[in-house]
Image (cartoon, helix red, strand yellow):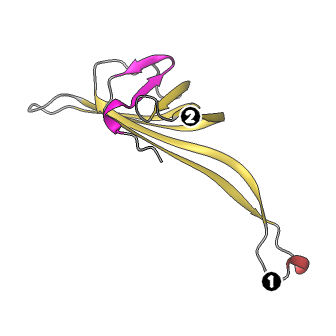
Amino acid sequence: MAFYTGKTGTVSIATASQPLTDWSADFKSESIDVTNFSSSGYQENYAGISSADITASGPYDGSMGAQVGDSAAFVLTAGSGGISYSVTARITSVKIDVNVRGVAMCTLTATSNGSYSVSV
């Protein structure tokens, strides 16, 4: 089994590579309960709506490639030669932190808006 190092991960938003330092993606699917009298005492369900929530952060260079409210193509990679996640997502929040003793930092969050894919 391969392990991927975060030091070569990348974030691209609307095809523009961003100089961020970390990202996370939470992929999930609703579970629709279809348990009934003939389920023999076992839970049964179907897959419902699938979604992904993205958070990315790092030093702020003055541009994010998209703004709050925009739907943009995100490409998140888990290192050189690693897994790549392509997600169209609506940006729901951009937070900028500025401190006199450090570099300005930004954090953005987005939620999927349509389908997404995983490439190995």
Q: Is residue 12 magenta?
A: yes
Which image quarter is the C terminus in? top right
Question: In the drawing, what numbered circle is on residue 120?
Answer: 2
Q: Nearer the viewer, mark 1 or mark 2?
A: 2
Q: Residue 41: within the magenta?
A: no
Look at the picture and state if 64 lies above or below 34. above
Contact flag, marks 1 and 2 (Cβ < 8 Å): no
Which residue type does callout 2 highlight? Answer: Val
Disc 2 is placed on an element classified as loop
Q: Which residue is mark 1?
A: 41
Query: Which label sits on residue 71?
Result: none
Q: Amino acid at mark 1?
A: Gly
- The residue at the point 41 percent across, 19 percent down is 17
38 versus 80 height, above or below? below
Residue at the far bottom in the pictured view: 41
Q: Could you say where residue 117 lies in the image, as x and y percent from the top left?
A: 63, 34
Marked residue nearer the N-terminal end (1 or 2): 1
Residue in the picture at 60% in, 51% down:
28
Q: Is residue 70 visible?
A: no
Residue 42 visible somewhere in the drawing = yes
> Between 76 and 93, which is closer to the camera in this rendering?
76
From the viewer's side, name the closer residue of 90 and 83: 83
Left/right of residue 33 with respect to residue 12 in the rendered view: right
Residue under the point 28% across and 25% down? 60
Q: Which residues are magenta?
A: 5-18
- Where is residue 93 shown, x and y percent of the image? 44, 36
Image location (x, y in percent) of residue 53 = 52, 43
Relative horizontal placement of residue 63, taking residue 13 as reference (left or right): left
Q: Position of residue 111 (x, y in %)?
A: 55, 39
Residue at the image point whose x is 55% and y is 24% from the top? 72
Label 1 packing within 10 angstroms: few (<14), some (14-19), many (20+) = few
